[in-house]
Image (tube, rainbow, N blue to C red):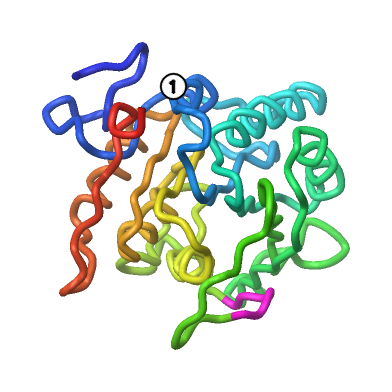
Amino acid sequence: MATLGPYYLGPDTAHPAHGIYYGDCVRGMAKIPDGAVDIVLTSPPYNVGLNYTGFDDNASDGEFKAFNRRWLTEAYRVMRDTGRAYVVVGDKMLWWFKDLAEQIGWTYVQLLTWCKPNMAGGAAISGDWDHLTEQILLFRKGKRTPMLNGEGVNTHNWFVETAPQSNFNGHQRKRHPAQWPLGLCLKLLARTPGSVVLDPFAGSGQGLLAAKLLGRQYLGFELSLSVAIEARDYLRNTQPPLPMAIPEQLSLEAIA
């Protein structure tokens, strides 16, 4: 099937069986059945004026909160009972985002911190203190299930991971204005049970690539066509280490 409503699968119509869709995530998630997802791993816009393609990152407070309510509501519906959601948020969002999620039905679990050591120094700071961290809100739906354990799996709630930069190479090269490091995504997913990972704001595809490298199935939405194409190619050109089998890249038909 080449198209799904206004959505191009992929958006590569010649290869429809993969998991990045071009289009609005709220309308896209509406096509996912109830309880089909195990993990949400995402970083929504912060409404701080970043130069996104096809999205206004300077909305009014009311519009921005309504937008977050819409996508959180759909994400809750498609989440399986016992599923978990990791949401990276800006510090100004932190104080109202938790309450908004709880109103929808999410259970707040814990606050995690991402520390960016390479952001110290250099340009003048924009506030009283330099921003070297970002916060990750962890929620769950329903009853808690045990986390995974294994060699090298970090159990701390504080992660030191270098932020991507345009002068870096490989997975650490910055390709998107709001890109988080692959290493952080890998650490979060490695300890979290569940086989189907959803990123409503796929961006550069780092979260989905982490799912692929760990043998999970993945599904994402991206509002910019050019960003979706780049993320699709990025995932397609990076293979899991042998002898791990390549996970099935989900289409909406595959989980219907």
Q: Most extreme residue toward the bottom, as rendered?
A: 151
Residue at horizontal 57 percent and vertical 75 percent from the top: 118
Residue at horizontal 61 percent and vertical 62 percent from the top: 145
Per the image, the residue denoted by label 1 is: 31
Q: Most extreme residue toward the left, as rendered?
A: 14
- Indicate left or right for 74 with 7 as reference: right
**Badge 1 density bin: few <14, some 14–19, many ≥20, Cα 10 Å:** some
- Indicate left or right for 124 with 11 as reference: right
Q: What residue range appears in magenta?
A: 155-160
60 and 9: which one is in front? 9
Q: Is residue 223 above or below residue 210?
A: above
- Indicate left or right for 229 with 72 as reference: left
167 and 177: which one is in front? 177
Q: Which three-letter amino acid code belongs to the residue tagged 1?
A: Lys
Count numbered badges in the picture: 1
**Image quadrant containing the N terminus:** top left
Spot occupied by residue 101 in the image (x, y as percentages of width and height): 76, 40
Q: Is residue 102 above or below residue 63?
A: below
Q: Is residue 158 magenta?
A: yes
Spot occupied by residue 212 in the image (x, y as percentages of width and height): 31, 57
Q: Is residue 59 magenta?
A: no
Dot 1: what SS?
Answer: loop
Residue at horizontal 44 percent and vertical 49 percent from the top: 197
- Indicate left or right for 104 with 209 as reference: right
3 and 103: which one is in front? 103
